[in-house]
Image (cartoon, rainbow, N blue to C red):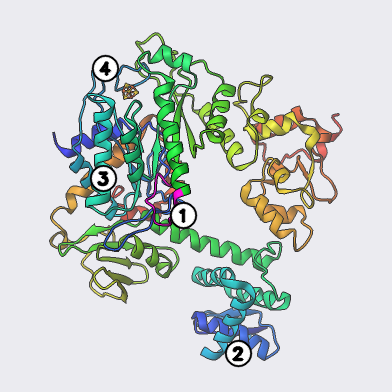
Amino acid sequence: MLVYYYDGTFEGLLTSVFEAYERKEQPESILPPHASAGLFAHTHEVVTCAKKSERVWNGVKKIGGVLTCEHLYYTFLSQEEGFEMHFLRYCQHLFTCNRPVMKDLANADVLKVFQLSRKVGREAHRILMFLRFEQAADGTYFAPYAPKYDVIPLVTGHFRERFADQTWVVFDSVRNYGVMYDSKNDTVEKFTINDPAFDVETGKLQPDAEHPEEDNWQLLWRTYFKSMAITERKNLKLQRNFMPKRFWKYLTEKRI
Amino acid sequence: METTQKLEILSAAAKYDVSCSSSGSTRSNMPGGIGNAAKSGICHSFTEDGRCISLLKVLYTNYCIYDCAYCVNRRTNDVPRACFTVRELADITINFYRRNYIEGLFLSSGVVKNADYTMEQLVGVAKTLRLTYKFNGYIHLKAIPGASPELIKEAGLHADRLSVNIEIPSESNLKVLAPEKDYRSVLSPMSLIKVGIEQNKEERRHLRHAPLFTPAGQSTQLIIGATPDTDKQILSLASNLYHQNGLKRVYYSGYNPTNLYDSRLPALSAPPLRRENRLYQSDWLMRFYEFRVDEIVNDEHPELDLEIDPKLSYALRNPHLFPVDVNKADYHLLLRIPGIGVKSAKMIIAARGFRRLNSENLAKLGVVMKRARYFLTCNELTAATVQDLKPEYVRAILTSPVKKGRVPDAIQLNLW
Ligand code: SF4
């Protein structure tokens, strides 16, 4: 059994696709570092190479167009176990057919890539829905979140356009990094913090770091949220379907 | 009165107004401004009854000079009343927006003093948001029936959507429940808005930067079950509003029993939610599934079937159209198959360009085979369809409480 090891990056994965062609072989799985290949595996170490990955990516873009690129990139962001082989076979199918295969949904790999990219897209959309900012004492709007997939790259554009006149920070508390938007210079910067000024469990800023009016607005929002409910038609299951519980800890209206 | 208290009263009074959609507009942010309107709309939260919260939905005030029988805020009712100020409401909106709680504002109101005065306050809030706060998020204003054309026009310049509620599906019944009102006061602002939208489209064709006029169009709401109007009447009215008045949405609101002392109202114990739901499904069929209104309800079937959805009901009334061959049928026909939605119909068309589809493929594309199997064929060993089984029987299967694992492929054929 032939196993490829790659470094877990997008470029590394594209390099693996390249090498499968170059070496005229078909691996049975492509694994990130630290994954176990099993006892009898025959392994090949893929060394990430900018040139190789670029050639593959350009080929994908040329044949498949931007939408295909988006699907593949989203699939990568899903990080679902074993997604790499679907990724590889999708690319191979694309190069063999030499036309976009996105719609060939009866092909198992195409369908899988479509579904994974949809999952990631949906998660990104949920961030647009459920992200909640709190104003800090210095005026910055701060929002922690804990998404299933690493979707920061997919949501910054939206917030940048929408909240162009306020300085804001979005922080991924699972992956421990965030982006900061500076409204004066219209720049977005990536950063990591070791000692955050907020409570990771509730997302709340520490009292002295909070804007004096913040609590007031939060109280108003909770008031509104509560009074919108039609209690005679209570349906908590439906509510949870639309707004999964894993988002609740950072939701202003749901935390106590 | 404290703002919190006002918000409590004035949102509670607005919550039964069903339209909460923030979609259909594309307003982009401007330099130095805040906000934009996302094309597809975004829900930001869900209430305990599972409804989407997308907009700050409130009344400007619940004081009212009218006495409509079906309304909690009628002047003769003794309820707590409140009234915002323009500035106060604009502030709440902008602060909610900055925290990503909402997409914008949906503002309605009881009528204080007179229609024009009330409309002025609503327009005032929209203007403050747009001009003072440079807010480019979503604004939906209620046009107050009877307000002057100038005010309606001004409202249209700042709002993404305007709506005038018809409320009662026929004028004769409106006269019974709200003798002070008539259809004219609703229909004339409606046609004014329609004309405004058309002119604006024309203007923008020549002049790309002409100001927008209600880019998300207009909508209205009908109250269901407060009067004896039939589903046929209701849906025909809706169909006319879509086709003749160019409305974007018609909302149906199951009458929430209130003012029980008023003998002009039916004695309901709960709002007719099932019926409301069937009306929405029918509305979808008209807007996205290429159904004509008389295919859903007609003289022979003036009321919707509450037990099954209107699409299944149509299919069972028209068994001669089935089974449909999914590898050949056009989009229009695919959409008529129960268990196939807009998304899966499109996917079928895309995927069959690559290969013939079998039932396994269909299931993977999201077709609900449990339902669809009786109405389609894909040239495999054919299972029993609605043709072999008869509509009454298919109906019985699809409505019977789920008997897991006993789907009647083989068993039942010999019964007939
Ligand atoms: S005009 Fe509107 S708010 Fe006033 S009583 Fe009639 S329905 Fe209620």
Q: CA distance from mark 3 to mark 2?
A: 66 Å
Q: Residue at x 33, y 40 (%)?
A: B155
Quadrant assignment for ligand 1: top left
Residue type at mark 3 is Lys
Residue B168 % position (x, y): 45, 21
Q: Quadrant of the C terminus of chain B?
A: top right
Q: Nearer the viewer, mark 1 or mark 2?
A: 1
Report the disc number at residue B77.
4
Q: Identify which residue, B194 or B43, lies in the foreground.
A: B194
Is the C-beta of the residue carrying label 2 under 8 Å from the nearest atom of ligand 1?
Answer: no
Residue B60 % position (x, y): 26, 34
Q: Nearer the viewer, mark 1 or mark 3?
A: 1
Kindly identify which chain the residue marked by label 4 belongs to. Answer: B
Residue type at mark 4 is Asn
Residue B224 in sight in this render? yes
Comes first in the chain, label 1 or label 3: 3
Q: Residue at x 56, y 19 (%)?
A: B230
Q: CA distance from mark 1 to mark 3?
A: 26 Å
The residue identified by callout 2 is: A44
Q: CA distance from mark 1 to mark 4?
A: 52 Å
Kindly identify which chain the residue marked by label 3 belongs to. Answer: B
Q: Nearer the viewer, mark 3 or mark 4?
A: 3
The answer to whether marks 1 and 2 sit on the same chain is no
Quadrant in the picture for residue B140: top left
Report the disc number at residue A250.
none
| Residue at far front of view | B206
Report the disc number at residue B206.
1
